[in-house]
Amino acid sequence: MGRLRSVHRCGSCGAATARWAGRCPACGEWNTLAEEVVSEGAQAPFRGSGIGEGTALPVPLCSVDLSGAAPRPTGLAELDRVLGGGFVPGSVSLLGGEPGVGKSTLLLQVLRSVAETGSVVVLVSAEESSAQVRLRAERLGPVPPTLLLLEETDVRAVAGTVEATTPALVVVDSIQAVADPNTAGLPGGVPQVRACAEYLVRLAKRHEVAFVLVGHVTKDGALAGPRVLEHLVDTVMTVEGDRHHALRLVRATKHRFGPTGELGLFAMGDAGLAAVTDPHRLLLGDRRPGTPGSAVLAAMEGQRALLVEIQALWAPASSDSAPPRRSAQGVDAGRLALLLAVLEQHAGMVLGRTDVFASAVGGIRVTEPAADLALVLAVASAVTQTALAPDVVAFGEVGLGGEIRRVPQAERRLSEAARIGFRRAFVPLSCPDGPPGIELLRVESVAEAAALALADVGARSGTGHRLSA
Ligand code: TYD
Ligand code: MG
């Protein structure tokens, strides 16, 4: 072993610097550097090897054996869709998400499903006790005997289990709770998380076993782990959703074996996560058509079109001195502020002394610019107290000049809207023709869109806000 020295490693990007600093010089994140002791010998694996010493020979790419690369289905169709078939033997996947979102539940269901085919699967539980895991598993149904449990926090103990049981799948819950006895630092810290993940990646490759690691992330991304881990693993998946709503979205943000645009939809219920095949029932089920402040967005999540209700509410600002309140849930707060400014400038709406609340309904987050037009229409509808027609959807990006800009995958959005029963769509001027059964209302500007949408239907109750267009 070489001489020991200390470096400062960034918990966000993994870069090492000699000196501590408040801000990581590599990625610019604040307060992410933590001290780590490294061996200099281990840092220089190539020292002393001159050119020409290597004996490894390349092979023709077309002759590489593919038999091990076939994904193995998990039996959960929504997850298999995200993974492009299932988990690949020898691969390591990371499943990230906020605490309580349903990571352990989803993976327990995967383990049960694979175990039901007769394969041995192992859950390494480092966070919950065996009894807790059994209670949760029994909530989901009878537990197959080939689902094995290892309550363990020492990552090196996993190797013995893998050798003794040759499982098809191993889940480690979570990577922040296991530790490598040969590495310094607390579990969950960057050195530990990295050492444990590197160890498990080697183990997975050596035994051709698919591993899934659970990784917690907090809202501000402060926890060391997933971002460092992303480089080490083959697949990064996330579970998203609002804990107070049933809908859960699973997607792959990195995937070495397949697509990354696919979205899996689940609903959290009494018996765990159930596949959602008709998301509009969950997302639009409680909509009250004809209510001011509501607009339906034809959104895209990956390759999947979703109809999402966008709601807005306004109230006179509570104080003359304080700035008016702007609250955004499930939509981007910065985007909302920008769109309100566009409405003032380009549609003649007076919003300066108005509190505005906007949200996407159903616990879903819409971040794509295509949501702009629906958000603008929801706000315009709220402040004029004029309901939009119940059969219209909208999508389009709003530019700073008030113009409505083209967005991708218009055909898919329109097809899904038509399938669910919407008959008209506010779309950008350049939008290509849609499927039969849905009329396109092509609009050039927010002023035109708001005027057209609000003149369409609904009773006006004077609010003091006017539209100039
Ligand atoms: P969990 O899988 O423990 O989340 P994570 O591992 O991401 O921290 O999910 C916990 C939440 O899910 C908890 O609030 C209870 C809820 N839940 C259900 O609603 N139904 C169920 O059948 C199960 C098992 C959990
Ligand atoms: Mg958990």
Image (cartoon, grey):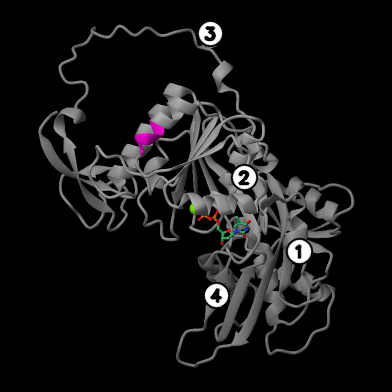
Residue at figure coordinates x 34%, y 35% from the top left: 156
Marks 3 and 1, how far apart in space? 51 Å
Q: Is mark 1 on a helix, strand or loop?
A: helix
Q: In this view, does 433 lie above or below 116?
A: below
Q: Where is residue 90 in the image (x, y as percent from the top left)?
A: 49, 26
Query: Over which residues does the magenta segment extend?
Result: 155-159
Residue annotated with mark 4: 327
Assess disc 3: are there few (<14), some (14-19) or many (≥20) residues with their C-alpha within 10 Å of its C-alpha: few
Assess disc 2: are there few (<14), some (14-19) or many (≥20) residues with their C-alpha within 10 Å of its C-alpha: many
Q: What residue type is labelled 2?
A: Gln
State if disc 1 and disc 3 touch (CB < 8 Å): no
Residue at figure coordinates x 75%, y 73% from the top left: 451
Q: With 168 as the anchor, is 292 left or right in this view?
A: right
Q: Which amino acid does label 4 sit on?
A: Ser
Residue annotated with mark 2: 109
Of badges 2 and 1, the one in the foreground is 2
Marks 2 and 3, how far apart in space? 37 Å
Q: Is mark 4 on a helix, strand or loop?
A: strand
Image quadrant where residue 241 sits: bottom right
Residue annotated with mark 1: 284
Q: Position of residue 411 (x, y in %)?
A: 76, 46
Q: Which amino acid does label 3 sit on?
A: Ser
Say whether residue 369 is magenta. Answer: no
State if disc 1 and disc 2 touch (CB < 8 Å): no
Assess disc 1: are there few (<14), some (14-19) or many (≥20) residues with their C-alpha within 10 Å of its C-alpha: some
Image quadrant where residue 349 sits: bottom right
Q: What element carries label 3?
A: helix
Marks 3 and 4, how far apart in space? 58 Å
Of badges 1 and 4, the one in the foreground is 1
Query: Magenta segment, principal secondary structure?
Result: helix
Q: Is mark 2 on a helix, strand or loop?
A: helix
